[in-house]
């Protein structure tokens, strides 16, 4: 469960008052009283601050936590799979075999990972409102962007160790400035074998009971030394049991719990079917490609796993909206609020414009959706090398402009992240690049038609696969030194470049930017403007705005370790090491790794392995620590059950479950299976 | 455009009075007056009989026509692609190179093709009504099936040259007995190269302007001699031009133009997304598989083409229902009729039960949809060998029963078709079988979960791909002699068989039959019962029932040769040979075949190649003759434009277009490109 795909186009809304253990709460607005009433425990400010500072965001789309004062970070294996892949070679396949650093000096730097610790939250709503007052449409979008950029730049003050983001909550209902401590030197300390982390593979993903050992440890460094992280979390002294009250602190990626009917229909009928068909086809290609040998398997297994994960998640979301009862409930919810607003002349005058405004923005999005995805969101150019080409091209152009006029990802405050991505020294497998680029260029032709002028301009008389192969083999952007030269050479160097990938990026840039502009002005800004009204209507009618929709910002969820009933069948809360060995078939993805088979005699089969709980989480929460009343670590969230997938739109207290690796199982595995006493000792020492 | 996938589960409805050139009319109920009013030409009974008798149904799901008195049949290349594949070998690749028989004796038998000529239509509605009077639910289904079987068996009278089908029109509004002359010895006379038949490939499919030479000629034989077919169609003396009134006689496979809102939502939210995801993934697998060498390409290119065709067609249908305006119009249509009925106490008492009845049947279908598709419709067992195993298993059991108790496809009247399929002598490529069976078994595990008892029973500790490979390599059902032994050995022989594919079919048969029973009793019968009411309500309110939804029965459509406006762009009605050469890139699928490049100097570039027309057609109409006022052939339908895909649910007179190969182009190609003067002469002689 990670944030994927929707980074740009996610269209979210605010959420009604919470029911049961529903809620992805802001730390600044946690319903401690509600928890106290239900569970007799009231987290205070010190408790909340401690858990917040112990929490980590992995900028690529995951959650994590500090578990020692020497910068040790716990997260999921699947959150750093691409790092492990970057560090692997055909001869040293770390993804297959796992990795253990015997000492600090053996820890290996992940080229693309950035970790953030949230240090300060400031409400900047008034500033933003003042800057956008009275503006509509493109002017609103422009003013909003300029003000966000101004606030961020002032906050970061050109210190690359500080990251500042103005985050939008309640879709424009509120704006917060998040000030993070930024770590860009993040190293791998330990990872299990991929077959153990992903035990059960796609069939078991989003299912339960399951038996994944989806854990890994990183360490953040500063000045080539382990960073001091005194605000780490401490490990629990006793493990979590069924019925225990626990908390999950992490970064849910995106929910859309209050949407108008038009928005939901757009998701159900356009957005989700688009992604599902795209990913299903890509999955087929990768599955078959992998059969062509060990090297092909090695270079695509992680990507396939990601594709399968997204596909299953999106199908789960679609199934929720396709369910007649769930759909009817969402329609009723929207209509009830609208009816209340429209029945009251004062409310109608204040907020009534929200619905037609959102309908209009949604219809604008429908109109550009396909071309926007293909050209601006790069679905037609599924290639890391193309992504680098576009970044170089745009960085050159954008850096010539004042901050407030730049595309958001090229403002001064964002440059450290951009530079890390541009200059990383990780292998880019050419054959896979050609495969996915060819695949996506074929889709471009299919989606727009062979006669579309842009398709003709790009393909000419070429077959998509031939063009992709030629581009990938001729570009020199695989070399970080070349990228640095182009970046540092600025506009002039990039203008002069004849690199074929730069040439391709240039050929589509005008159209892509045009679509971006329409999206920003007619879709995104209009939705923000009108969701602001919708949120205010909500507060006016219901008296509270509840928690904001998830936006990959830090949230706290409370709940219990608990199974559920699947029809007549009772699904238990915990699984054990013993169950893992029972599920072993010897065949992928149900083959227990040799390390575990060897350690089996030393392992107590009753040791808890995975656990289900009622926490309201979603993609992006992967790697979140689960803590007990003392704020101590009892688990590591890595999945949800199938019912949690509908959590994008609504929380079902009966059946929606988070899934975590059990804390006891983690330490036991580290010591007895992986010989990682160094890390287990460090964690236990830090827990004292 | 062919009938695919929906053979069993198509859930259809009757259609409102026609607008413009909308309508897939029964020959027995053709609106001659309406045509006369619009075009000044009134087809009389003789005209209609002539065109009907000149029309041919290919039982596999296509249309065709007789074009000489010696049994010469014209259809699309894509309609007999699987025959050409059956006749191909690695050394003699007829699909790639095309085929031309220099004399009758060189014509080669298609192992699986059955051709039917509709000789007589009898209305048997009263008989059926009498047999089902008062029955509900399973009893209704049982009585209906028994009566249909009785009527068919009495009609066919065990003569394998007669085929009798009781067809359901208006979803139970009317029942007709169709008596066909049956031809099972069908031979290939000429076919172009696949790259010319499918020129433009998937990108151009359902697009226009296009340049496909999607034609082929077969010949039906009786007693090893060309059959006498005096009722053939005659070729036109002059070609069709823009604006000409023409007619298309063929077998549209299925429409769903009057459906209740629940039925349409079920299609949009469940049925279509299911197929689209399935086909998209299979497409990815096949695309990548094909890259593995010439033999892999040879054995899967036709299948890939089918998959891509279905995928594009289904996406087009989904897009129609996903369009807010089209959806709103469908909802209004349904609600208007319902409101009229419910507002009138007499109508309400008679027909009001239709809506809740259909809703209940649809909800039953939703409940079993996935398992029914997987287990009974064989989506979990995508393998010809499995299909043969199931047929043998079921034939043994069913033939022990009296006709009226058998599954419909095993009644006496259906045995000739079954036997042709079972005993055909065509190669079954093992590697492809293992590929698709492995793919579908993996989907079974994914869809039902690794812990499902049936999945456990089938897979045990096996990986799906391993099991598939073992089954395919060990079964002996690839040998038609073995199949004949088992078939003739009856229940005892099949019970004793340890063939692994029979064993697998046996292992799922109880579940599959159970799902079939639920589908027949709670879905199909209930829909027929209630659509009968809906149709009567329609007649009561609108005064006519119009034309029935398409059901792969013979229909006549009238219209004009005409382009359309795509946004601001005018799409012309005709394309030419010259345009074909302009579109040549040398790369698949835009590579003009060497035969055409060689013949180019002899060809007039102005020769018409393809044409668009306003006829209301749909999948199944492929291969339909297009005739002029004289009933003479002017074209050969092979496609529709993208807007025609929504024709499943409604006809858009502005933009819905059929696409045909132009008659002049066909003869010109036969003579000047393919040296097939023998056939061109035969056709022209027959036209005198």
Image: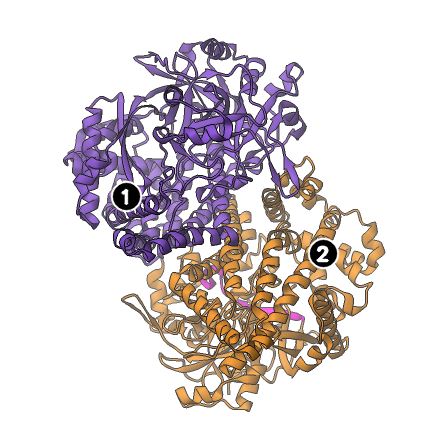
Chain colours: A purple, B orange
Residue B65 image offset from top left, x and y in percent: 55, 77
Q: Answer whether residue B191 is magenta in the image.
A: yes
Distance from label 1 to label 2 (Cα)?
A: 56 Å
Residue A649 image offset from top left, x and y in percent: 44, 45
Q: In this figure, which residue is indicated by the disc labeled 2?
A: B513
Residue A400 image offset from top left, x and y in percent: 15, 35
Mark toward the viewer: 1 or 2: 2
Residue A466 visible in the picture: yes
The circle on residue A504 is: 1
Task: Describe residue A555's horizontal placement relative to residue A669 as left or right.
Answer: left
Task: Describe residue B488's horizontal placement relative to residue B513 as left or right.
Answer: right
Residue B103 visible in the picture: no
Residue A404 image offset from top left, x and y in percent: 17, 37
Q: State which chain disc 1 sits on.
A: A
Q: Is residue A614 above or below residue A277?
A: above
The 10 Å Cα crowd at callout 2, few under 14, some 14 to 19, many 20 or more, is some
Task: Describe residue B67's horizontal placement relative to residue B605 as left or right.
Answer: right
Q: Is residue B687 above or below residue A50?
A: below
Q: Answer whether residue A377 is magenta in the image.
A: no
Q: Which residues are magenta?
A: B184-199
Residue A150 picture quarter: top left
């Amino acid at each position: 469960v990670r944030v994927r795909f929707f980074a740009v186009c996610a269209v979210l809304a605010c959420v009604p008052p919470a029911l049961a253990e529903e809620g992805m709460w802001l730390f600044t607005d946690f319903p401690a009283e509600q928890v106290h009433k239900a569970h007799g425990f009231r987290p205070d400010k010190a408790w909340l601050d401690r858990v917040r500072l112990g929490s980590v965001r992995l900028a690529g789309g995951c959650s994590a936590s500090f578990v020692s004062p020497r910068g040790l970070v716990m997260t999921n294996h699947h959150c750093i799979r691409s790092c492990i892949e970057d560090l692997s070679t055909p001869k040293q396949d770390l993804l297959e075999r796992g990795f253990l650093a015997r000492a600090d000096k053996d820890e290996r730097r992940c080229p693309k990972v950035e970790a953030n610790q949230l240090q300060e939250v400031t409400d900047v709503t008034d500033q933003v409102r003042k800057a956008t007052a009275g503006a509509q449409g493109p002017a609103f979008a422009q003013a909003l962007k300029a003000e966000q950029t101004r606030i961020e730049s002032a906050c970061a003050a050109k210190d690359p160790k500080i990251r500042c983001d103005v985050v939008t909550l309640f879709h424009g209902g509120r704006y917060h400035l998040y000030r993070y401590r930024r770590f860009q030197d993040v190293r791998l300390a330990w990872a299990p074998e991929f077959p153990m982390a992903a035990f059960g593979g796609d069939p078991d993903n989003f299912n339960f009971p399951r038996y994944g050992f989806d854990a890994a440890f990183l360490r953040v460094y500063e000045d080539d030394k382990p960073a001091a992280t005194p605000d780490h979390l401490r490990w629990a002294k006793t493990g979590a049991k069924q019925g225990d009250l626990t908390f999950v602190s992490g970064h849910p990626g995106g929910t859309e719990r209050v949407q108008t009917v038009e928005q939901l229909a757009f998701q159900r009928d356009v957005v989700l079917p688009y992604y599902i068909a795209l990913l299903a086809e890509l999955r087929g290609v990768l599955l078959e490609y992998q059969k062509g040998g060990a090297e092909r398997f090695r270079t695509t297994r992680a990507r396939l796993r990601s594709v399968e994960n997204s596909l299953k998640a999106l199908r789960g979301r679609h199934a929720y909206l396709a369910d007649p009862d769930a759909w009817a409930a969402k329609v009723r919810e929207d209509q009830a609020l609208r009816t209340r607003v429209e029945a009251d002349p004062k409310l109608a005058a204040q907020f009534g414009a929200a619905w037609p405004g959102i309908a209009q923005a949604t219809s604008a999005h429908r109109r550009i959706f396909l071309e926007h995805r293909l050209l601006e969101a790069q679905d037609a150019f599924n290639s890391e090398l193309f992504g680098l080409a576009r970044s170089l091209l745009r960085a050159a152009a954008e850096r010539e402009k004042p901050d407030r006029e730049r595309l958001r990802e090229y403002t001064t405050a964002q440059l450290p992240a951009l530079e890390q991505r541009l200059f990383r020294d990780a292998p880019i497998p050419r054959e896979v690049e050609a495969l996915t680029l060819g695949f996506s260029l074929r889709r471009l032709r299919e989606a727009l038609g062979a006669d579309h002028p842009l398709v003709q301009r790009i393909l000419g008389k070429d077959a998509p696969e031939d063009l992709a192969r030629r581009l990938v083999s001729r570009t020199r952007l695989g070399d970080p030194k070349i990228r640095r030269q182009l970046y540092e050479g600025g506009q002039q160097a990039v203008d002069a470049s004849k690199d074929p990938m730069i040439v391709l990026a240039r050929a589509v840039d005008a159209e892509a930017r045009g679509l971006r502009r329409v999206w920003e002005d007619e879709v995104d800004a209009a939705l923000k403007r009108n969701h602001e009204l919708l949120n205010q209507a909500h507060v006016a009618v219901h008296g509270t705005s509840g928690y904001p929709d998830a936006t990959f910002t830090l949230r706290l969820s409370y709940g219990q370790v608990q199974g559920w009933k699947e029809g007549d069948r009772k699904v238990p809360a915990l699984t054990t090491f013993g169950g893992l060995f029972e599920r072993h078939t010897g065949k992928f993805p149900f083959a227990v790794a040799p390390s575990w088979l060897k350690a089996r005699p030393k392992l107590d089969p009753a040791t808890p392995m995975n656990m289900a709980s009622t926490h309201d989480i979603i993609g992006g929460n992967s790697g979140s620590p689960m803590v007990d009343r003392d704020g101590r670590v009892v688990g590591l969230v890595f999945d949800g059950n199938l019912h949690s997938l509908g959590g994008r739109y609504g929380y079902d207290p009966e059946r929606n479950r988070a899934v975590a690796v059990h804390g006891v199982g983690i330490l036991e595995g580290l010591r007895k299976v992986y010989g990682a006493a160094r890390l287990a000792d460090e964690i236990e020492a830090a827990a004292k």
